[in-house]
């Protein structure tokens, strides 16, 4: 029997082992969570352009505004819309000014996730991982690596092939090639919004679009796994003290891609402003500056900006949902704004020949039951509801037993 495990934000909220003492934030408390972290006051963490945007455009006190519970999806969407409009109509200075707060917000978003997931392997995720069979599929809309670490600990899953694609390189103390000749293992972990440990090159503005600066195609993905030793990164600002699948604010630079060549008749000039209140780090800084490969929490998610990988991942997720006899949903509420997700489920269920059993773990399951029953056509007789938060003491055996 094949099972699809679908993880939403409620699954991430179950993690209480963070070294920060905090839990993964939701959209409305993201910035209040950020302010409680040590990285908030770290001079290496860039946030000046974001604060300047709020002061200049919003005409608000940035700290007070963000403490008020502003939704990160709304703010990130607003800043992205300004950026896209500026890329289409603005001059070079305006493009740089619009790009900086967007870029800072992306790094901050990934950094908050990395800080909070930095701790012991998540116990509830470990229990889930041990119940999965090799042919099962995990589908998640979360950016954290809680499930990645839990699966890795089982010894039956690796980043080499476990994400549903072959990475260009994997950082294990140094950049190494993935083992593509290994027999297929499982289960597969499909991360439909990217991952805090997936990397691409730092984006640049190019003919009205912002694109990765790598010479390789935009769909090339690098993956960070672990390192206890300093690595080359922007300004050498390596931060120690992180568990596997997590890193400090700056991920390792890419060393196997020289970057886009300049147009004929032009040269590339790289410069880094140096100011006394942002000291250089002691690690190396060679290579191509990397960036988190995530689809940020914005209203209009731009999956096509990174080429084919996300299209392929969503197709694999749809195929798995179409074939699964059992679908286990943990902490995912099918938000109405996420039309792409709803369309995927509609297509998967329309193409099925049988009706799956769907198990739901949610403290407030009624909206989920309604969507599955009324929108997706799953009869209530095939729905098993566990009205509770996902936690280590949850009856995982019962959840997976039909």
Image: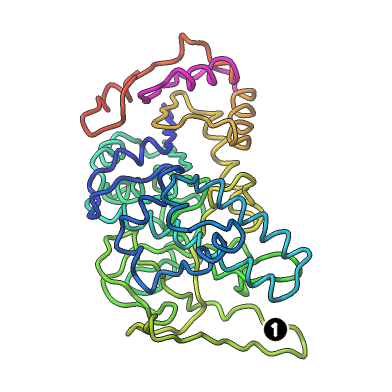
In the picture of the structure, the residue carrying the numbered disc 1 is 262
Residue placed most toward the observer, 47 or 179: 47
In the rendered image, which quarter is residue 159 located in?
bottom left
Circle 1 residues within 10 Å: few <14, some 14–19, many ≥20: few
Residue 11 image position (x, y, % from top left): 36, 37
Residue 160: tell me if it is visible: no
Residue 195 image position (x, y, % from top left): 46, 53
In the rendered image, which quarter is residue 134 located in?
top left
As drawn, 366 above or below 25: above
> How many numbered markers are drawn?
1
In the rendered image, which quarter is residue 93 located in?
bottom right
Q: Is residue 330 left or right of residue 292?
A: left
Q: Which residues are magenta?
A: 352-375
Residue 20 image position (x, y, % from top left): 25, 54
Residue placed most toward the observer, 188 or 34: 34
Residue at the extreme top = 381
As drawn, 108 above or below 350: below
Residue at the image point whose x is 64% and y is 87% from the top: 268
Residue 213: tell me if it is visible: yes
Residue at the image point whose x is 56% and y is 28% from the top: 322
Q: Is residue 244 left or right of residue 336?
A: left
Residue placed most toward the observer, 262 or 274: 274
Quarter of the N terminus within the rendering: top left
Quarter of the C terminus within the rendering: top left
Give the colouring mode of the picture.
rainbow
Helix, strand, or loop for circle 1?
Answer: loop
Q: Is residue 220 left or right of residue 158?
A: right
Residue at the image point whose x is 35% and y is 24% from the top: 363
In the rendered image, residue 229 lying in the magenta stretch gets the answer: no
Q: Is residue 134 left or right of residue 18?
A: right
């Amino acid at each position: 029997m094949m099972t699809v495990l679908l993880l939403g934000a409620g699954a991430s909220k179950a993690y209480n082992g963070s070294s920060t003492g905090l839990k993964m934030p939701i959209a409305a408390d993201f910035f209040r969570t950020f302010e409680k972290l040590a990285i908030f006051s770290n001079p290496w963490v860039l946030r000046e352009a974001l604060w300047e945007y709020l002061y200049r455009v919003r005409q608000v006190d940035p700290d007070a505004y963000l403490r008020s519970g502003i939704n990160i999806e709304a703010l990130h969407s607003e800043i992205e819309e300004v950026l896209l409009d500026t890329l289409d109509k603005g001059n070079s200075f305006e493009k740089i000014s619009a790009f900086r707060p967007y870029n800072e917000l992306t790094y901050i978003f990934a950094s908050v996730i990395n800080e909070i997931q930095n701790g012991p392997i998540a116990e509830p995720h470990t229990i889930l991982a041990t119940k999965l069979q090799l042919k099962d599929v995990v589908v998640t809309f979360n950016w954290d690596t809680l499930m990645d670490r839990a699966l890795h600990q089982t010894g039956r899953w690796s980043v080499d092939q476990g994400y549903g694609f072959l990475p260009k390189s994997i950082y294990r103390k140094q950049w190494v090639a993935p083992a593509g000749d290994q027999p297929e293992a499982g289960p597969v972990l499909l991360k439909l919004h990217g991952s805090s440990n997936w990397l691409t090159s730092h984006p640049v503005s190019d003919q009205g679009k912002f694109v990765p600066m790598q010479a390789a195609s935009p769909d090339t993905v690098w993956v960070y796994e672990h390192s206890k030793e300093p690595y080359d990164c922007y300004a050498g600002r390596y931060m120690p003290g992180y568990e596997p699948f997590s890193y400090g604010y700056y991920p390792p630079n890419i060393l196997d891609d020289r970057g886009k060549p300049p147009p004929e008749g032009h040269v590339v000039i790289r410069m880094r402003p140096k100011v006394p209140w942002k000291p250089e780090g002691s690690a190396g800084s060679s290579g191509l500056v990397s960036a988190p490969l995530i689809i940020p929490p914005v209203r209009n998610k731009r999956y096509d900006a990174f080429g084919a990988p996300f299209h392929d991942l969503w197709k694999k997720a749809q195929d798995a949902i179409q074939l699964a006899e059992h679908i286990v949903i943990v902490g995912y509420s099918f938000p109405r704004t996420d039309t792409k997700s709803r369309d995927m489920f509609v297509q998967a269920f329309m193409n099925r020949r049988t009706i799956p059993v769907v198990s739901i773990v949610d403290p407030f399951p009624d909206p989920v039951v309604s969507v599955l029953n009324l929108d997706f056509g799953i009869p209530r007789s095939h729905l098993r509801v566990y009205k509770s938060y996902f936690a280590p003491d949850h009856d995982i055996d019962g959840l997976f037993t039909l």
